[in-house]
Amino acid sequence: MNRRIMLATTALAVAAAFSLSATLARAEETLKIGFVGVTSGPAAAWGTSNVRSMQTLAAMLNEKGGVEIGGTPYKIEIVTFDDQKDPKRAIAGMEQMAQQGIHYVVGPNVDDGAAAVRPVAEANDIIYIPYAFPKELYTKPAENAILGMVASYQSGPAIYKYLKDNKGVSKVAFVAANESDPLSQRDSGVAAAKALGLEVTSADVTYQVDTTDFTPVLLPVLKTQPDLLVLSGVAPAAAPQLIRSARDLGYTGLISTETAQDAKVIEEGAGEAANGFISVGGASTPEIASDYMKDFVAKYTEMFGEYNDESNTKVYALEYILETLKADPQGLTDIGAFKTAIDSFAAPNPYMKGDAKLSYVGTTSFGQKRQLSVPLVVNEYKDGAFQTLFVATVD
Amino acid sequence: MEQIIVNGLFLGASYALIALGLTLIFSLMNVLNFAHGQMYVIGGFITYTVVAQFHLPFVVGLICSAVALAALGAFVERFLFAPVIRRSKREESTMLLAAGIAFFLDAVTLLVFGEKQRGIPKLVPGVFNWDFRIVMPYDRILIGVLAVALIVAFILFMRQSRTGRAMRALAQDRMAAELMGVDVARYSMIGFALGAMLAGLVGGLLVSIVGVNLGMGGPTSIKAFLMIMIGGAGVISGAIAGGFLLGMLESVGLSLLAAYGDITYLVIFASLMIFLAFRPQGLMGKPWG
């Protein structure tokens, strides 16, 4: 009898072990998602917030056993490459992704990097989600790039119109760093301001990317006495210094930008001088953030010590990739299926309260759906935090 | 014009302080310390941490930056540069080592202090305004005065103290100094520590004005090299002159050339090339080294 019990117990244990190993094997499938962007230098915050958002979301999903796509659970692995904001390195990064058989990449963060990787991505069946605004990346014949945020030429007009209607702004001045992204954002901003009938008092003044003292830069701009000073494409590192210098020089008008910023950085660098500063954000302001978004912020803070408000927008890219793959699992190996799924894709937006949806947009700007539908949240900085000024949608 | 001069003087004072540390290290050891900018950045982050995270006074932050960077400088000299200089006669060995240290410090800074821009509250509120002819926040005036005071203290230290005189002797003729009984190894280490300390101090000083971020190291090193090329490499008065000259050129360029786009540094670099073609040793350097 004892022998029988022992045999039965052993058989059960072996069966359980086989069953467990089979379950483990099922969860061992890994889906690699790439990141190519800037995680060092003055613009490190842009790419780092991307990478950390992806890593946080991947950790949250993996802790729950992974993501089920086509009936198979996948662990998510984030493969990262720092392009140092250098287009040549961005190409090398994208080639590295191709060598690893990765079909979905988030980044690059800037215009020239995003343009440079296009041939590599198209030759190697890679869908990539840049945070760069050149329209040719998203209009046919280009098909592989999907804009990951709201472009300045989409948010700028909305912000200027709001300020014209609600704050009586009539004169605008622009200042930009002397590199491609800020300059192109300045040009589109100037065009948008003129289209609204605003007077552009200054748009020629630029500054070196590594400028640390903005007083001499801003002097000629502020002499034109604008109602609104637009910091076109301003890097998170430069925004507080520009705000502080402008206020030190006695400027009392409005200051805005079309790039995402971090409230803590603004608070430390500019303090009360930044009250009223207007920027574009994502979905974590208390008025609109869902509980899932709050969980994400908590997990991010747990993993990296401090949350970055730029992740309010950056959180979406990986979510979109995974949800679209769920919609058509063939996309795992065939990006053609992913592109087809884009047109009809719709899923609940887990980061916002209410019944907001994830979907692809961009038909108005690009003639095809090549943009993530991210809420256009225009924020106003006030005493260390962003408050939602208004929420709009693109397309 | 008054505003341009005041801006130039403020920039010049902080630039000169950065250049002093670099030129001191170069004069003592013939080492081009490409990691000087990274040391400046670490100094800024340390002061930020002490003041903004631990809520201690700014002076404590400055002292912590100075001590930490002096220790880092001494360590780098004793365990990295000194062995390389002993074993290799090729100057590019120390240059490669310095570049490697710069990359390493960048990586460590990212890991320890993160990717974000950091800053501390204004030390003194308010703005000095002389009929809009000169507008200068009081905290800038304070930092400018402190920078000038540190430059003066450094000069006095080099002239009056035994250590300073030993280092000057070492800079003038290393072999003669050694024959006269100067402990070359010891004073090289002290000199490197002092140079790194100056970088850390100015990083700490300026964190209250311009903040600090990971990417500031490289550009700071480039500007520091520019200053000592203008003034004359290895000459203390040259570093000071180079710093003030670059600050003034930057201020004038940004104000008067603004209408023509961002060409200030283009003009400065072009002028420097022409200047060095006629006077390769800089304003105060000696043609023989």
Image (cartoon, coloured by chain):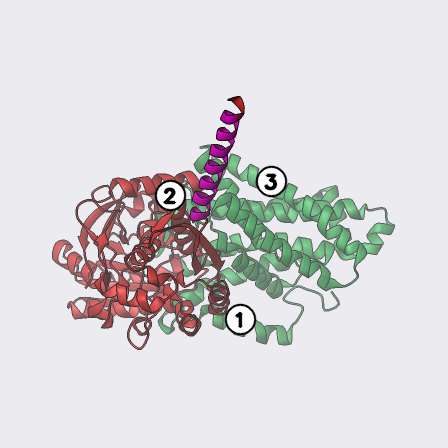
Chain colours: A red, B green
Alpha carbons under labels 1 and 2: distance apart: 51 Å
Q: Which residue is mark 2?
A: A60
Q: Quadrant of residue A338?
A: bottom left
Q: Which residue is mark 1?
A: B269
Q: Are marks 1 and 3 on the same chain?
A: yes
Residue A177 seen in the current view: no
Residue B233 seen in the current view: yes
State the image coordinates of residue A232 (x, y, percent, origin top left). Answer: 31, 62
Left-right relation of A161 to B190? left
Q: Amino acid at mark 2?
A: Met
Foreground: disc 3 or disc 2: 2
Q: Which residue is mark 3?
A: B68
Label 2 secondary element:
helix
Mark with earlier residue (1, 3): 3
Tell me, yes or no, whether the highlighted magenta stretch contains residue B183.
Answer: no
Left-right relation of A222 to B182? left
Of B143 and A350, nearer the camera is A350
Q: Which residues are magenta?
A: A4-27
State the image coordinates of residue A222 (x, y, percent, origin top left). Answer: 29, 60
